[in-house]
Image (cartoon, rainbow, N blue to C red):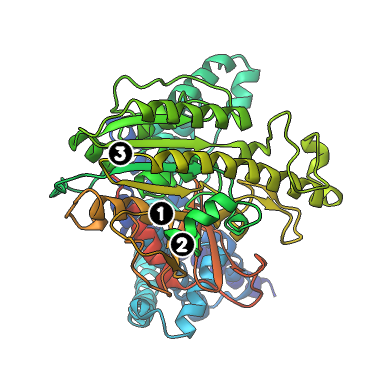
Amino acid sequence: MLETGNIYRDNVSRLIGWGHWLVFFNILLALLVSSRYLLIAGWPDTLLGGGYMLTSWVGHFAFLSFFTYLLTLFPLTFLFPKIRAVQFLGAAIATGALTLLLVDTQVFSLFKFHLNPTVWRLLLEQAQAEEASGWGWLFVWVPVLFLFELWLANWLWRWSQRRRRSLTLPLALPLLASFFLTHSVHIWADALVYTPITDQKANFPLSYPMTAKSFLIKQGWLDEDQYRQLSRQVAEQPQRRLNYPLRPLSVQAPDTSPNILLVVADGLRADQLDAITMPNLNRFASRHLRFDNHLSAGNQPRSALFSLFYSLPSHYQRDAEQEGIAPVFIDELQRQDYRFGLFASGGLDKPLYRNAIFSTLRNQPFDTAVNGAEGDRKAAADFSHWLEQQDNERPWFSFVYLDALNELDLPADTKGPFQPSLQQLNPTQAYQNEQRDALFNRYRNAAFYTDRLLGQLLSRVRQVEGRDTLIIVTSGHGMEFNDNDNNTWGFGSAYSPYQLQVPLVIGWPAQRQPARFSHPTSQLDLMPTLMRQALGVQSPLRSYSTGQSLFKADANRWRLASDEDEYVIYQQDDITLFNRRGDVQLLRARDYKTEPDASPELSLLLQVMNDLNRFQGE
């Protein structure tokens, strides 16, 4: 009995020693496979950042490999202390782990995030549907790797039995030092907000580098106010460079350039454009071009206006503001010697206007102003006064921004025709289902007031003689009033059709016949259409926009809306939501509810990711 126990202990001891060598060689294989992350993520700008990347790469994958061994093969060694069984299990575990790692490198190269349960389920479903032909290499990789692991396990067993000199310390010590150095340096970098290091935390899968700000502040080793000041300074720095446009534009300017008036009545839903709520705009739409299936690219003012002017997803907005990059549309208007008249309810003293959209314009009043109904009235009056001073020698561009609908605001002496209406707007009480009808009537009254201002604007512009005027009336985003019975209100709270579908009406002098379009269009399409058909830009649309021509009828196209972190893809019947962390959700377009047994298309996500990253600088 004693002899049997000794044999068991000897077998287990030798198998554990062999297992450590198997782990070491698989660490080398894991480093070889994971070196792809270094290429995808790009080399940091500083020497310290580069040194940290290499150290964390070695330390992290050494830890993952050894931890995988501890959770799997190590306990199995005690249960099945037979060399053939343990070799087979070790080869199978190593093959599975390295295959997962290789798949994750592919996912990271395509989407810039790592495998999670949602993405894994998506990959499996696409493979079963035979739509993931690009993953066929796995059928070669897995058996070849498994055979190699079997050979390696057998060779290491024979080699480890002959080895006399211990190599544990010289081999394990650098790996252990890399692991602890990775977390120690990250604690320091996180406390000092040293971004060449802290920005690397998403480079590797299952990477959770250590932080200790609270502990350091408690011990008095870190000044909390200084840390917050550093954080603010870093937040104001650009995260990546905007490469926009991709190449210089080729332009053949028209002989006679039209005046261009862009009116954004923000918060206006598409379904409010009718003869009852908005008779003036509806009458204008019936005589010109109306786009009934038009989608904004943002669900709140800043992202919507950015995407409208730049024809880019709004995750580029911070870069444009911090680098002072104006839209190519504004640059081309300047090149063609346009005059500018800018009139915004709430004023132009906002980073989006001052530092981005109109950053290259001189002598513009970037001042604050009253907003709401009074701000709209003043913006419309200022535009009319400015228009009286213009002559026909040079074309002009005017931007008029109205936001009474955003504020659900009315002039003090106005009740509106839609009753009963909420008279006092208290957000803590107004956004309740019992108040929905009264709140919605207040919104319709604000739309009716906005329509009155639009009628005055349009009437005034029609009096302009000597040069054609191209008139665009649209909205940045819509407004929701619990329309889907999911307690969603206002704007910026969801990507439902009520918050994204907006009207688009264009009075185009070159298009004399009225027309009504039902094909899907996007706010990302407006500027490329104007650039090509009004300003004579000949360059491919993809070189400066993510949109297409408004007049290109494509019933099967997808449309994108976003903010800095979340993205939404609209198709005919489906809405796909996803974020930078790789969370993906599929909703029904008709009611904005989850599709229980459906998954997004892998090919669609690939197309969208390409569009999202197309203008990202090196």
Identify residue type, mark 2.
Phe
In the image, which is nearer the foreground, mark 2 or mark 1?
1
In this rendering, position of residue 391 left or right of residue 560: left
Residue 84's x, y, as percent? 48, 81
In this rendering, position of residue 320 left or right of residue 483: left
Label 2 and label 3: CA atoms lie apart by 34 Å
Q: Which residue is mark 1?
A: 506
Mark 3 crowd level (few <14, some 14–19, many ≥20, 10 Å Cα): some
Mark 1 crowd level (few <14, some 14–19, many ≥20, 10 Å Cα): many
Q: Which residue is mark 2?
A: 291
Identify residue type, mark 3.
Arg
Identify residue type, mark 1.
Ile
Q: Residue at x 36, y 34 (%)?
A: 357
Q: Which residue is mark 3?
A: 241
Residue 56 in view, yes or no:
no
For mark 2, give the secondary structure: strand
Residue 115's x, y, as percent? 49, 62
- Residue 146 position (above or below residue 443): below
Q: Considering only order in the chain, which callout, 1 or 2, is on the residue closer to the N terminus?
A: 2
Label 3 and label 1: CA atoms lie apart by 34 Å
Residue 315's x, y, as percent? 43, 45
Q: Residue at x 33, y 28 (%)?
A: 359
Q: Residue at x 64, y 75 (%)?
A: 4
- Residue 543 position (above or below residue 466): below
Q: Residue at x 55, y 74 (%)?
A: 573
**Furthest residue to the right?**
434
Residue 244's x, y, as percent? 26, 44
- Residue 167 position (above or below residue 105): above
Query: Cβ–Cβ below 8 Å for labels 2 and 3?
Result: no
